[in-house]
Every structure is written in C-alpha cells, then in structure tokens.
Amino acid sequence: MRVLYPVLMVSQHQNGVLKAQRAGADPLKYTETAGGTWMWAERAAVGTAVVATSLAVCAPVAQQAFRRGGWLNSNPYLRVGFGQHQGRRVFRAAGRIIDWIGQRSNAKIDFWRGGPI
C-alpha cells in the first residue's frame, strides 16, 4: 500500500532560509494566467464539483429536515415540510405563526401540491 504525502515545493531562498509551500495551494493560479479557454474550463470544472458536492450533502439533510416528524416539521410555532391534503402530497408551512399571518386558526400555506399518496 502506498502512502501519499503532500508535495512540498521550495519557492524562494530568503536570507539563507528556504521557504516551502504546498504544491497546488492555489489551483486556479496557472489557469488565470493562461486565460481564455483554459480559464473558463477550470471555472466550469470547479463549479460542477461544488454543485455536485452540495447536492450530495444537502439532499440527505433536507430529507431528514422536512420529512414527517423531521426537525423542521415538528415545531408548534412554525412547521415546514411534507404533509398530505385530500390524499395528495403537499409541501407546506403551518403553525402558530402562520395562524397569526392568516388571521385564522389552523391556517396552512401550500408551496407545492404533488400526486396521490
């Protein structure tokens, strides 16, 4: 099994002291100076990686937060999450704050209405 260590590059020699820095510390440095197609391709690749990572992290968190009994869907003052209405799935907000906004008891705001359960 190989163990990989960060690559160090000697960048300058100042006053008899070698100054080392990690290789790849600024991944966009060389494409910024190259410009043109390379620069935009690098930005697109980084943007794609950020979006993919965000989806991979946020999707399970959102599923846990908005599901029935989830941490955003179980508060008496403001509940946001999935529920059901007349046999169909809905994504809604409810609670005492919504009752106060709607000026009536048991008010709900439906953001999305889905198909049958």
Image: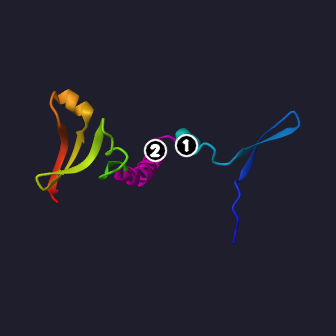
Q: Position of residue 18 (x, y in %)?
A: 83, 41
The magenta segment: 35-64
Examine the rendered structure and indicate whether residue 75 appears above or below residue 117: above
* 20 displayed left or right of 102: right
Quadrant containing the C terminus is bottom left
User: Is 46 within the magenta?
Assistant: yes
Tell me residue 3's x, y (percent): 70, 65
Q: Name the amino acid, label 1.
A: Leu
Say which amino acid is labelled 2: Arg
C-alpha separation, residue under disc 1 versus residue under disc 2: 8 Å
Query: Which structural element holds mark 1?
Result: loop
User: Looking at the rendered structure, which numbered label has been put on residue 28?
Assistant: 1
Q: Position of residue 74 (x, y in %)?
A: 32, 45
**Mark 1 surroundings: few (<14), some (14-19) or many (≥20) residues within 10 A:** some
Q: Quadrant of the N terminus?
A: bottom right
Q: Residue 108 occupies which quadrant of the picture?
A: top left
Q: Nearer the viewer, residue 16 or 102?
A: 102
Report the residue marked by disc 2.
Answer: 43
- Determine contact: label 1, label 2, CB under 8 Å: yes
Hey, which residue is sitting farthest left in the picture? 86
> In terms of depth relative to the viewer, which is nearer, 55 or 91?
91
Q: Secondary structure at mark 2?
A: helix
Residue at horizontal 25%, vertical 33%?
96
